Amino acid sequence: MGDRGHVTVIGAGVVGVATALCLVRDGFDVTVIDRDGPGENCSFGNAGMICDATSAVPLPSSQVVRGLPRMLMDRKSSLHIRWSYLPALMPWLLVFMKSARARERLHNARAFHALLDGAVASWDRLVDGTQGAALIRKRGLAIVYETERGFASAAAERAILRQLGAEFSELSGAEVRQSEPRLSDAVTAATFLPRVNHTVNPYRLTRAIADGVFAAGGVVETATVTGIEVSDGRVRTLRTTAGDRKVDRLVVSAGAWSGRLAKMLGIRVLLDTERGYHTVFHGTDSGLRLPLIHGEKGFGVNQMDEGLRLAGSVEMAGIDAPADYARADMLVERGRGLLRNFDPEPSAKITRWMGRRPTLPDYLPALGKVAGLVNTWFNFGHQHLGLTLAARSGEVMANLVAGRDPGLDLGAFRPDRFHR
């Protein structure tokens, strides 16, 4: 049993269970509460990449802002906004456009770089002594392009990365095929990121971390939080479908549902959900050694232990709208041409999935406290990088809850930064 007191973590996705494991190793008693089992939402179906500081440049940019009309008109756009959701999205979208300005983008990239810089090493520490270590590969990542124009369009991002000191190399199509011969001749250029790791099964990895929480004496409870009682600046009680739960310390790490929990605390956060899709060809071995990101069409390709997964796209439609699985089929159409002789067996089992990435409009997560709540911390909004940042932000939370300096300036990640 821990000797530092009790912490309740709301959320059993990879960020929540990583936070719980860091806390329980730090001497806290920990209870994780989620309406579903560990890893059964966004952590189930992502592309499996554990990125380094080369992912520090946030998505908001002048180029993306110029593409907003197409996002509304073209259902097959890599980033699509449903017309019916546009009025609800407007406050988020206005801050997104502000964050796209060059000065704000560089400021956010610097802050994000400092957080991401320790992400891979944090994962090494997190999985040490767990079954999760066997699920991680350390081979790097290739961002591939089918046109020279597409490769050139990412030059501004690469320039910012050079300014930040990130490690990467630029390759021709022929050069990247030397290490990845299964790539087709359609690939004309690539950026190789040598320090990016990946997992062959993000769901099993999340479950392995949850098993580490169990093994260390933590508890994972299936329940939905329906209300939160606050008095004198402290969260006192969680109302749940399994009964009331007293709270000593609280960490809100519920992914896309964190905004609803913050609202129960009287806090408004500009959190929305980027709905991403995947298609898996079960039992298919593509021969790929590296995970891939298509730099022009915005999706990932990764050889998982269960088969080949194509994952990605962004759909802004809210947390409750029904899935549009045509977007999963779109990934297959666009990804097929990347691989040489990609021809799955006609009998191959194919599954499609949709998940909700929790995203704040500047693409930085929410990490830390808000004024007026002395026993509550927030850890959500990791957008496409939830898997990447799970271990790193878990360590940050453990330091904060224990009253230690996390060794990182968290000013850019204030949960209430849009509503001070």
Image (cartoon, helix red, strand yellow):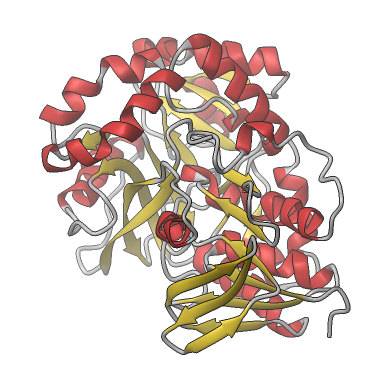
The image quarter containing residue 193 is: top right
The image quarter containing residue 211 is: bottom right
Q: Residue at x 44, y 36 (%)?
A: 293
Q: Residue at x 63, y 20 (%)?
A: 169
Residue at the far front: name it: 232
Q: Residue at x 53, y 77 (%)?
A: 238
Horizontal side of residue 222 vs 62, given as left or right: right
Horizontal side of residue 419 vs 400, given as left or right: left
Q: Position of residue 247 (x, y in %)?
A: 64, 76
Residue 356, above or below 1: above
Q: Nearer the viewer, residue 92 or 197?
A: 92
Residue 10, above or below 368: below
The image quarter containing residue 98 is: top left
Residue 322, above or below 247: above
Q: Residue at x 88, y 78 (%)?
A: 3
Q: Nearer the viewer, residue 62 or 86?
A: 86
In the rendered image, which quarter contains the C terminus? top right
Horizontal side of residue 237 vs 6, given as left or right: left
In the rendered image, which quarter contains the N terminus? bottom right
Q: Nearer the viewer, residue 333 or 59?
A: 59
Q: Position of residue 152 (x, y in %)?
A: 43, 9
Residue at the far bottom: name it: 243
> Can residue 141 be seen by looking at this rendering?
yes
Q: Nearer the viewer, residue 287 or 190?
A: 190
> Can residue 201 be seen by looking at this rendering?
no
Q: Position of residue 386 (x, y in %)?
A: 54, 50
Q: Position of residue 275 (x, y in %)?
A: 31, 49
